[in-house]
Amino acid sequence: MAELALAAAGGGEGLAPSLPAKHVAAVAIGNALQFYDFLTYAFFAAQIGRTFFPSHNPASSLLASLATFGAGFLTRPVGGVVIGMMGDRIGRKPAMLLSFTLMGFSILGLALTPSFAAIGVAAPVAVICFRLVQGFALGGEVGPSTAFLIEAAPPLRRGLYVSFQYMTQDVAVLAAGLVGLALANLLSGPALDAWGWRVAFLIGAAIVPFGLILRGGLPETLEAVEARQEPSPPLRPYLRVAILGLVMFATAMMANYVLTYMTTFAGETLHMRANLAFGATAVLGLCGVLFDPIGGWLSDRFGRKPVMLWPWLFLLAAAVPAFWVLAHFRNAASLFGAVMILQIPLAISASSVLVAITESMPARIRSGAVSTLYALAVAVFGGTTQFAITWLIQITGNPLAPAWYLAAAAAAGLVAILLFAETAPAHRKAPA
């Protein structure tokens, strides 16, 4: 069986055998599919609007399409509670299988739903239902999958293994950008409207059978963890962890959604060429692929807090200058440079946030707590970020509005990090 190579592998107490590569892939593939679908829908929102929400006013079709996309955020917290708690009660594996099955069903359903012209009002109703199901599935994905990695990985390599969750997300960002660019260049406008956008979704749906096969071969980690669980500690300390964790997740989501907005920002606000805007998405994904695992490895070596603290301090300092240069020069170098300067520290810190919050939770509530906190952060803060910064740009007329929004988010996150305890096994303080 192929084993995933450990960065900086070495001896030491608490090192378990490395986790099989196919198990890491089985867990991380859900996050990859989530981000691929998110960006694919965003890229083709206009085509989806014309297909399912036809109107004499193109803006109305687009708004209806975006509202349907946003509907998926409504069911994320519900999925976080239901599927996350399922992961705590009957096991991580069945929860991951359920979330991925529902995810695949909804993506395939959206791709194959006939147009409004073919079946009338049933088309938009079906699309909304698929988005609600998908939001439910995605809400329950992160808790069981991250709990599995925390429990199955070598204790001194948890950061590295959890980083593969985010690395595969950024592989999906890169893939979605390349697929969108290819289809936009190869197909005419009518072809994109008629069937081209469906091809992008079917590419994502094609990996679902492989993901189900991989997840079906996973072992269960819940029983092994509960077998060695200590007596239940007081609940109050975990309420503090939950509040701080929600702030940290919210900061990470707001920063991430500001950066994924770069394509729209470059095209709509700065009026840059479409190929440059799509190129920003590719740069965003590539930086994540390269620096996500580096951040995970650093958090194992130096602790979770330093690898969250210093990158977010850099984000706080760099956000406004990076956007100022971009708004002033409006060329490829300034766009790609701004994306790199902001994405690299975010990628380095991302895994530490997820692993620190998950490590802080006892096994009996780990899956449900992480799923719920993550889903709330996505729905309340991530899901509103792009609307909020678009509104701020419109009312202020200032293209630096996204930068100030990002800086404010980073400042709130820094406060939560300073109050959060170190959780890395090699660096946390022993109890008094």
Image (tube, rainbow, N blue to C red):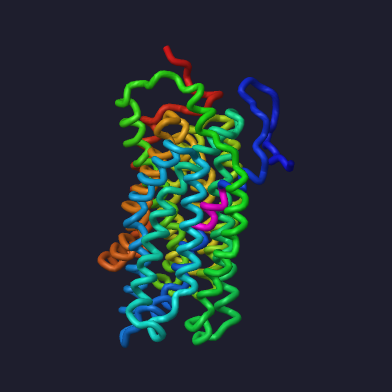
Relative to 291, residue 65 above or below:
below
The structure residue drawn at horizontal position 27% and vertical position 64%, both measured from the top left corner, is: 396
Q: Position of residue 270 (x, y in %)?
A: 42, 71
Q: Position of residue 300 (x, y in %)?
A: 57, 32
Q: Main secondary structure of the magenta part?
A: helix
Does the magenta segment cover residue 31? yes
Magenta residues (range)? 28-34
Q: Position of residue 390 (x, y in %)?
A: 33, 65
The structure residue drawn at horizontal position 50% and vertical position 54%, both measured from the top left corner, is: 100
The structure residue drawn at horizontal position 38% and vertical position 38%, both measured from the top left corner, is: 369
- Where's the C terminus, which quadrant? top left
**Which of 230/340 is in front?**
230
**Which of 217/248 is in front?**
217
**Extreme front residue here?**
90
**Which of 161/208 is in front?**
208
Q: Is residue 259 left or right of residue 396?
A: right
Q: Is residue 392 left or right of residue 29?
A: left
The structure residue drawn at horizontal position 38% and vertical position 50%, both measured from the top left corner, is: 79
**Extreme top residue here?**
432
